[in-house]
Amino acid sequence: ATMPPLLAAVAVAGRRGTLVKDVTVIEALADIDTVALDKTGTLTTGRPQVTSITALGSADRDAALVIAAAAEAGSEHALGQAVRRHAVAVGLDMRSAQEFTAVPGEGVRARVDGSEVLVGRPQLLAKPDPDIDAMVAQLQDDGHTAVLVIIDGEAAALVGLSDKPRPGAADAVRALGQEIGTEPEILTGDAARPAAVLADQVGVHRVHADLLPADKVAVIRRHQSSGRRVLAVGDGLNDSPLLVAADVGLVVGDAAGGGAGALTVQAADGVLTRDPLGALAPLVTLARRARRIAR
Ligand code: ADP
Ligand code: MG
Protein backbone atom coordinates (compact mmCIF):
# COMPACT_ATOMS: atom_id res chain seq x y z
CA ALA A 1 0.00 0.00 0.00
CA THR A 2 1.19 3.54 -0.69
CA MET A 3 1.38 6.09 2.07
CA PRO A 4 -1.20 8.91 2.04
CA PRO A 5 0.46 12.05 0.59
CA LEU A 6 0.32 14.15 3.76
CA LEU A 7 1.86 11.37 5.82
CA ALA A 8 4.49 10.84 3.14
CA ALA A 9 5.33 14.55 3.41
CA VAL A 10 5.85 14.18 7.16
CA ALA A 11 8.33 11.40 6.40
CA VAL A 12 10.15 13.34 3.68
CA ALA A 13 10.40 16.42 5.91
CA GLY A 14 11.80 14.21 8.64
CA ARG A 15 14.45 12.78 6.35
CA ARG A 16 15.46 16.36 5.48
CA GLY A 17 15.82 17.19 9.18
CA THR A 18 12.48 18.84 9.93
CA LEU A 19 10.47 16.89 12.49
CA VAL A 20 6.82 17.95 12.34
CA LYS A 21 4.36 16.65 14.89
CA ASP A 22 1.68 15.29 12.56
CA VAL A 23 -0.10 15.63 9.22
CA THR A 24 -2.13 18.66 10.37
CA VAL A 25 1.14 20.61 10.40
CA ILE A 26 1.70 19.74 6.73
CA GLU A 27 -1.83 20.96 5.93
CA ALA A 28 -1.23 24.22 7.80
CA LEU A 29 2.15 24.67 6.10
CA ALA A 30 0.48 24.40 2.71
CA ASP A 31 -1.55 27.53 3.51
CA ILE A 32 1.33 29.69 4.78
CA ASP A 33 1.60 33.10 3.12
CA THR A 34 3.60 34.98 5.78
CA VAL A 35 6.87 34.08 7.47
CA ALA A 36 8.05 35.71 10.71
CA LEU A 37 11.58 35.04 11.94
CA ASP A 38 13.01 35.75 15.35
CA LYS A 39 16.41 37.42 15.17
CA THR A 40 18.77 36.20 17.88
CA GLY A 41 19.49 32.50 17.51
CA THR A 42 17.20 32.09 14.52
CA LEU A 43 18.48 34.44 11.81
CA THR A 44 21.78 34.68 13.65
CA THR A 45 24.10 31.91 14.81
CA GLY A 46 23.02 32.33 18.43
CA ARG A 47 26.65 32.59 19.53
CA PRO A 48 27.13 36.34 19.96
CA GLN A 49 30.47 37.76 21.02
CA VAL A 50 31.05 40.50 23.56
CA THR A 51 32.65 43.31 21.54
CA SER A 52 32.97 46.03 24.19
CA ILE A 53 32.49 46.66 27.90
CA THR A 54 32.38 50.22 29.21
CA ALA A 55 32.31 50.98 32.93
CA LEU A 56 29.73 53.58 33.92
CA GLY A 57 29.67 55.96 36.86
CA SER A 58 32.13 54.92 39.54
CA ALA A 59 31.89 51.21 38.74
CA ASP A 60 34.93 49.05 37.96
CA ARG A 61 34.79 47.30 34.61
CA ASP A 62 35.97 43.83 35.69
CA ALA A 63 33.92 43.94 38.89
CA ALA A 64 30.80 44.77 36.87
CA LEU A 65 31.56 41.95 34.42
CA VAL A 66 31.97 39.42 37.25
CA ILE A 67 28.65 40.48 38.74
CA ALA A 68 26.94 40.41 35.34
CA ALA A 69 28.30 36.91 34.65
CA ALA A 70 27.06 35.75 38.06
CA ALA A 71 23.60 37.17 37.40
CA GLU A 72 23.56 35.42 33.99
CA ALA A 73 24.63 32.08 35.47
CA GLY A 74 21.12 30.69 35.24
CA SER A 75 20.31 32.15 31.83
CA GLU A 76 19.86 29.96 28.79
CA HIS A 77 19.67 33.09 26.61
CA ALA A 78 22.36 33.48 23.94
CA LEU A 79 23.30 36.90 25.32
CA GLY A 80 23.62 35.58 28.88
CA GLN A 81 25.82 32.74 27.71
CA ALA A 82 27.99 35.21 25.77
CA VAL A 83 28.50 37.37 28.87
CA ARG A 84 29.49 34.28 30.86
CA ARG A 85 31.87 32.99 28.19
CA HIS A 86 33.50 36.40 28.03
CA ALA A 87 34.07 36.61 31.78
CA VAL A 88 35.70 33.17 31.71
CA ALA A 89 37.77 34.03 28.63
CA VAL A 90 39.31 37.09 30.27
CA GLY A 91 40.15 34.98 33.31
CA LEU A 92 37.73 36.36 35.87
CA ASP A 93 36.59 34.18 38.75
CA MET A 94 32.95 33.20 38.70
CA ARG A 95 30.76 34.34 41.58
CA SER A 96 27.42 32.82 42.57
CA ALA A 97 24.04 34.50 42.48
CA GLN A 98 20.78 34.06 44.39
CA GLU A 99 17.12 34.62 43.50
CA PHE A 100 17.70 34.36 39.75
CA THR A 101 14.77 35.26 37.54
CA ALA A 102 14.72 35.57 33.77
CA VAL A 103 12.55 38.39 32.49
CA PRO A 104 11.62 37.17 28.98
CA GLY A 105 12.64 39.58 26.24
CA GLU A 106 14.21 41.98 28.73
CA GLY A 107 17.04 40.33 30.63
CA VAL A 108 17.77 38.75 33.99
CA ARG A 109 17.45 39.75 37.61
CA ALA A 110 19.45 38.26 40.50
CA ARG A 111 21.04 39.02 43.85
CA VAL A 112 24.84 38.99 43.87
CA ASP A 113 26.79 39.69 47.08
CA GLY A 114 23.71 41.32 48.57
CA SER A 115 23.22 43.64 45.59
CA GLU A 116 20.17 43.70 43.33
CA VAL A 117 21.48 43.13 39.79
CA LEU A 118 19.73 43.60 36.48
CA VAL A 119 21.34 42.68 33.16
CA GLY A 120 19.40 43.36 30.01
CA ARG A 121 17.92 45.85 27.59
CA PRO A 122 18.83 49.49 28.23
CA GLN A 123 15.17 50.36 28.95
CA LEU A 124 15.55 48.49 32.27
CA LEU A 125 17.33 51.52 33.72
CA ALA A 126 14.66 53.31 35.72
CA LYS A 127 16.21 56.75 35.75
CA PRO A 128 16.94 58.39 32.41
CA ASP A 129 20.54 59.30 31.62
CA PRO A 130 21.28 61.18 28.36
CA ASP A 131 24.99 60.21 28.40
CA ILE A 132 24.15 56.52 28.60
CA ASP A 133 21.45 56.93 25.96
CA ALA A 134 24.06 58.43 23.63
CA MET A 135 26.49 55.55 24.25
CA VAL A 136 23.73 53.01 23.66
CA ALA A 137 22.72 54.76 20.42
CA GLN A 138 26.33 54.74 19.24
CA LEU A 139 26.68 50.99 19.87
CA GLN A 140 23.38 50.24 18.17
CA ASP A 141 24.20 52.43 15.16
CA ASP A 142 27.24 50.22 14.66
CA GLY A 143 24.93 47.19 14.61
CA HIS A 144 25.70 45.93 18.11
CA THR A 145 23.22 44.73 20.70
CA ALA A 146 23.43 46.92 23.81
CA VAL A 147 23.07 45.35 27.25
CA LEU A 148 23.16 47.32 30.50
CA VAL A 149 24.47 46.01 33.82
CA ILE A 150 22.53 47.73 36.61
CA ILE A 151 23.63 47.27 40.23
CA ASP A 152 21.31 48.53 42.97
CA GLY A 153 19.57 50.81 40.50
CA GLU A 154 22.79 52.35 39.19
CA ALA A 155 24.13 51.71 35.68
CA ALA A 156 27.49 49.96 36.17
CA ALA A 157 28.50 48.87 32.69
CA LEU A 158 27.40 48.91 29.09
CA VAL A 159 28.12 45.73 27.14
CA GLY A 160 28.16 45.57 23.36
CA LEU A 161 27.53 42.24 21.66
CA SER A 162 27.43 41.18 18.08
CA ASP A 163 26.20 38.09 16.32
CA LYS A 164 26.62 36.94 12.74
CA PRO A 165 23.88 35.82 10.36
CA ARG A 166 23.56 32.06 10.08
CA PRO A 167 25.43 30.71 7.07
CA GLY A 168 23.03 30.61 4.13
CA ALA A 169 20.55 33.04 5.71
CA ALA A 170 20.50 35.35 2.68
CA ASP A 171 19.93 32.41 0.30
CA ALA A 172 17.12 31.13 2.51
CA VAL A 173 15.44 34.55 2.52
CA ARG A 174 15.71 34.76 -1.26
CA ALA A 175 14.24 31.26 -1.68
CA LEU A 176 11.23 32.18 0.45
CA GLY A 177 10.57 35.15 -1.82
CA GLN A 178 11.07 33.26 -5.07
CA GLU A 179 9.61 29.86 -4.28
CA ILE A 180 6.94 30.67 -1.71
CA GLY A 181 6.17 34.21 -2.83
CA THR A 182 6.63 35.82 0.55
CA GLU A 183 9.55 37.74 1.93
CA PRO A 184 10.09 36.92 5.61
CA GLU A 185 9.93 39.60 8.24
CA ILE A 186 12.00 39.92 11.41
CA LEU A 187 10.47 40.03 14.88
CA THR A 188 12.94 41.01 17.57
CA GLY A 189 13.24 42.25 21.11
CA ASP A 190 16.45 43.97 20.10
CA ALA A 191 16.56 47.63 19.06
CA ALA A 192 15.71 48.89 15.58
CA ARG A 193 19.28 49.72 14.49
CA PRO A 194 21.00 46.36 15.17
CA ALA A 195 17.95 44.65 13.70
CA ALA A 196 18.18 46.83 10.57
CA VAL A 197 21.87 46.04 10.16
CA LEU A 198 21.15 42.31 10.28
CA ALA A 199 18.12 42.69 7.99
CA ASP A 200 20.36 44.35 5.46
CA GLN A 201 22.89 41.51 5.63
CA VAL A 202 20.26 38.85 4.93
CA GLY A 203 18.08 40.81 2.50
CA VAL A 204 14.98 41.33 4.64
CA HIS A 205 13.07 44.59 4.27
CA ARG A 206 10.45 44.36 7.01
CA VAL A 207 11.60 44.59 10.62
CA HIS A 208 9.55 44.79 13.82
CA ALA A 209 11.97 45.75 16.62
CA ASP A 210 11.87 46.54 20.34
CA LEU A 211 9.16 43.92 20.84
CA LEU A 212 8.43 42.23 24.14
CA PRO A 213 7.23 38.61 23.82
CA ALA A 214 3.59 39.78 24.01
CA ASP A 215 4.24 42.34 21.25
CA LYS A 216 5.55 39.57 19.00
CA VAL A 217 2.29 37.71 19.55
CA ALA A 218 0.34 40.89 18.74
CA VAL A 219 2.12 41.21 15.39
CA ILE A 220 1.15 37.62 14.53
CA ARG A 221 -2.47 38.21 15.56
CA ARG A 222 -2.66 41.35 13.46
CA HIS A 223 -1.51 39.40 10.41
CA GLN A 224 -4.04 36.66 11.15
CA SER A 225 -6.89 39.11 11.57
CA SER A 226 -6.19 40.37 8.05
CA GLY A 227 -6.56 36.79 6.82
CA ARG A 228 -2.91 35.85 6.63
CA ARG A 229 -1.49 32.45 7.65
CA VAL A 230 1.73 32.80 9.54
CA LEU A 231 4.73 30.54 9.91
CA ALA A 232 6.87 31.67 12.87
CA VAL A 233 10.36 30.41 13.58
CA GLY A 234 12.11 30.99 16.87
CA ASP A 235 14.50 29.64 19.41
CA GLY A 236 14.70 29.75 23.17
CA LEU A 237 12.12 29.76 25.86
CA ASN A 238 10.82 33.28 25.34
CA ASP A 239 9.64 32.44 21.83
CA SER A 240 7.05 29.93 23.05
CA PRO A 241 4.09 32.39 22.98
CA LEU A 242 5.04 33.38 19.44
CA LEU A 243 5.21 29.77 18.26
CA VAL A 244 1.85 28.97 19.83
CA ALA A 245 0.16 32.04 18.30
CA ALA A 246 1.40 31.33 14.78
CA ASP A 247 -0.49 28.99 12.44
CA VAL A 248 2.70 26.98 12.30
CA GLY A 249 5.46 27.49 14.87
CA LEU A 250 8.83 25.86 14.33
CA VAL A 251 11.80 25.90 16.67
CA VAL A 252 15.41 25.74 15.55
CA GLY A 253 16.90 22.46 16.70
CA ASP A 254 20.24 23.66 17.97
CA ALA A 255 18.30 25.47 20.71
CA ALA A 256 16.12 22.47 21.42
CA GLY A 257 18.56 20.29 23.27
CA GLY A 258 18.24 21.10 26.93
CA GLY A 259 15.65 21.68 29.65
CA ALA A 260 14.26 25.06 28.67
CA GLY A 261 14.61 24.10 25.03
CA ALA A 262 12.38 21.11 25.59
CA LEU A 263 9.61 23.46 26.72
CA THR A 264 9.94 25.45 23.51
CA VAL A 265 9.71 22.22 21.54
CA GLN A 266 6.42 21.45 23.28
CA ALA A 267 5.08 24.83 22.19
CA ALA A 268 6.17 24.22 18.61
CA ASP A 269 4.59 22.28 15.75
CA GLY A 270 7.98 21.00 14.75
CA VAL A 271 11.75 21.17 15.10
CA LEU A 272 14.24 22.29 12.47
CA THR A 273 17.24 20.11 13.22
CA ARG A 274 19.25 20.81 10.05
CA ASP A 275 19.90 24.07 8.19
CA PRO A 276 16.89 25.67 9.90
CA LEU A 277 16.51 28.62 7.52
CA GLY A 278 17.39 26.78 4.31
CA ALA A 279 14.80 24.14 5.17
CA LEU A 280 11.85 26.57 5.18
CA ALA A 281 11.10 27.18 1.49
CA PRO A 282 11.49 23.49 0.51
CA LEU A 283 9.27 22.55 3.47
CA VAL A 284 6.40 24.81 2.38
CA THR A 285 6.79 23.65 -1.23
CA LEU A 286 6.65 20.02 -0.06
CA ALA A 287 3.50 20.71 1.95
CA ARG A 288 1.76 22.50 -0.95
CA ARG A 289 2.52 19.61 -3.32
CA ALA A 290 1.39 17.01 -0.82
CA ARG A 291 -1.92 18.71 -0.28
CA ARG A 292 -2.50 19.17 -3.97
CA ILE A 293 -2.08 15.43 -4.43
CA ALA A 294 -4.18 14.62 -1.37
CA ARG A 295 -7.20 16.54 -2.67
P1 ADP B 1 15.35 38.42 20.15
O1 ADP B 1 13.94 38.79 19.87
O2 ADP B 1 16.31 39.10 19.19
O3 ADP B 1 15.57 36.94 20.19
P2 ADP B 1 15.02 38.77 22.99
O4 ADP B 1 13.58 39.10 22.90
O5 ADP B 1 15.38 37.45 23.52
O6 ADP B 1 15.73 39.02 21.58
O7 ADP B 1 15.73 39.88 23.88
C1 ADP B 1 15.50 41.25 23.66
C2 ADP B 1 16.54 42.10 24.35
O8 ADP B 1 16.46 41.89 25.75
C3 ADP B 1 17.97 41.78 23.95
O9 ADP B 1 18.39 42.48 22.81
C4 ADP B 1 18.71 42.22 25.21
O10 ADP B 1 18.91 43.61 25.20
C5 ADP B 1 17.75 41.87 26.32
N1 ADP B 1 17.98 40.55 26.94
C6 ADP B 1 17.14 39.49 26.94
N2 ADP B 1 17.64 38.47 27.65
C7 ADP B 1 18.85 38.87 28.08
C8 ADP B 1 19.88 38.27 28.88
N3 ADP B 1 19.80 37.05 29.38
N4 ADP B 1 21.00 39.02 29.12
C9 ADP B 1 21.12 40.25 28.64
N5 ADP B 1 20.18 40.87 27.90
C10 ADP B 1 19.07 40.20 27.62
MG1 MG C 1 15.49 34.81 20.33
Image (tube, rainbow, N blue to C red):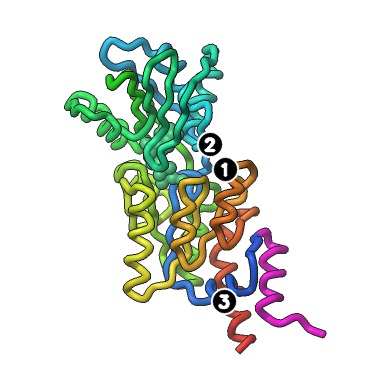
Q: Secondary structure at mark 2?
A: loop
Which of label 1 and label 2 is nearer to you? 1
Q: Position of residue 180 (x, y in %)?
A: 49, 72
| Disc 3 to disc 1: CB gap under 8 Å | no
Residue type indicated by callout 2: Glu
Q: Which residues are magenta?
A: 1-17
Q: Does the magenta stretch mainly form a helix, a strand or a loop?
A: helix
Quarter the N terminus occupies: bottom right
The residue tagged 1 is 260
Q: Position of residue 282 (x, y in %)?
A: 59, 68
- Where in the figure is residue 150, as x and y percent of width and height? 33, 23
Q: Mark 3 sits on what residue?
A: 27
Say which residue appears at 52% left-offset and 24% top-offset. 84
Left or right side of 171 for 132: left
Looking at this view, is 200 or 21 the one in front? 21
User: Is residue 177 placed above or below 273 in the rendered structure?
Assistant: below
Which circle, 3 or 1, is nearer the viewer? 1
Which label belongs to residue 76? Answer: 2
Q: How many marks?
A: 3
* Quadrant location, ligand no. 1: top left
